Image (tube, coloured by chain):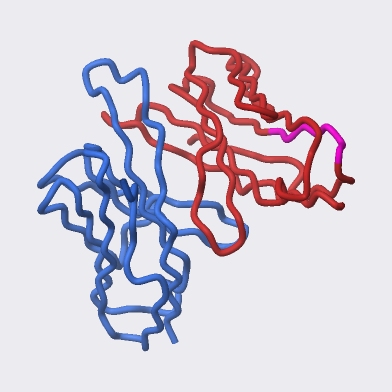
Chain colours: A red, B blue
């Protein structure tokens, strides 16, 4: 059974700092990994999707890397801003009985202090 | 292009009552999913659908039923609500290349429905 772990569960940083969020998974036979952002009381917004054949994806100040062999992904946020405060979730998909099953981590709650 | 929409946004039920949550997507996606999100447990898949007229069980299907009569809509039903079903429910949709099984599956989420069962 695929398990996805995100450490730390919560993180508080001063504005302007670069930071790294971690995601680890137990089954390396994944198809892709997706990072989401969730604001309080809201749905999930997709940030980056990394295919299994890729090692990283970038979007603006965000960079996500994937190391399938070690079962790890990191989300790097450069020059953090108060607007980055949210919960960040990673999710991995793998083949399960003919469909791509997606397993989510429990998230890292980020607070960027002005 | 509204993406994925969910109705209602909030609902309070009494134990034993029934209700239906509606999810609609306008992206012509084949796959649709219902998740529940509970503190400390992440998102867990309730049911999913790989196309119009199809449904399948996810991780936590007990107490729920679903229907996908039209490609753009996915309904989640609670026949007899229980306090354990108090949660936030999210619908999602995705495009998938069934032949390749290798790409896409980027999931797009609705805003959620907050359900309380008393």
- In terms of depth relative to the viewer, which is nearer, A37 or A73? A37
- Relative vertical location of residue A45 with respect to residue A93 in this rendering, above or below: below
- In terms of depth relative to the viewer, which is nearer, B108 or B105? B108
Kindly identify the residue that appears in the image at 12 percent across and 44 percent down. Answer: B52
Location of residue A109 in the rendering, given as x and y in whole percent from the top left corner: 71, 51
**In the image, farthest residue toward the front:** B1
Residue extent of the magenta highlight: A16-22
Location of residue A44 in the rendering, given as x and y in whole percent from the top left corner: 51, 49
Q: Is residue A80 left or right of residue A69?
A: right
- In which image quadrant can residue B96 be found? top left
Kindly identify the residue that appears in the image at 37 percent across and 84 percent down. Answer: B13
- Relative vertical location of residue A15 with respect to residue A58 in this rendering, above or below: below
Q: Is residue B7 left or right of residue A34?
A: left
Q: Is residue A63 left or right of residue B68?
A: right
Kindly identify the residue that appears in the image at 64 percent across and 25 percent down. Answer: A64
Location of residue B86 in the rendering, given as x and y in whole percent from the top left corner: 46, 73
- In which image quadrant can residue B11 be found? bottom left
Q: Is residue B74 rendered magenta in the image?
A: no
Q: Number of labelled discs?
A: 0
Location of residue A63 in the rendering, given as x and y in whole percent from the top left corner: 66, 24
- In terms of depth relative to the viewer, which is nearer, B3 or A105? B3
Kindly identify the residue that appears in the image at 81 percent across and 33 percent down. Answer: A79
């Amino acid at each position: 059974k695929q398990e996805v772990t995100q450490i730390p569960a919560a993180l508080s940083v001063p504005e302007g700092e670069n930071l790294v969020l971690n995601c680890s998974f137990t089954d390396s036979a994944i198809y892709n990994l997706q990072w989401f952002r969730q604001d309080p009381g809201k749905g999930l917004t997709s940030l980056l999707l990394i295919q299994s054949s890729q090692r990283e994806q970038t979007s603006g100040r965000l960079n996500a890397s994937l190391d399938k062999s070690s079962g790890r992904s990191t989300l790097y946020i450069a020059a953090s801003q108060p607007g980055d405060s949210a919960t960040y979730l990673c999710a991995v998909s793998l083949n399960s009985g003919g469909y791509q099953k997606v397993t989510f981590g429990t998230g890292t709650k980020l607070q960027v202090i002005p | 292009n509204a993406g994925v929409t969910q109705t209602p946004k909030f609902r309070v039920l009494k134990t034993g009552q029934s209700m239906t949550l509606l999810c609609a997507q306008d992206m012509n996606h084949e796959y649709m999913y219902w998740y529940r999100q509970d503190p400390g447990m992440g998102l867990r898949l309730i049911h999913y659908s790989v196309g119009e007229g199809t449904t399948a069980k996810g991780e936590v299907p007990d107490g729920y039923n679903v229907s996908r009569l039209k490609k753009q809509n996915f309904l989640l039903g609670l026949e007899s609500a229980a306090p354990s079903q108090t949660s936030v429910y999210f619908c999602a949709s995705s495009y998938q290349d069934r032949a390749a099984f290798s790409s896409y599956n980027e999931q797009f989420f609705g805003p959620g429905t907050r359900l309380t069962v008393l």
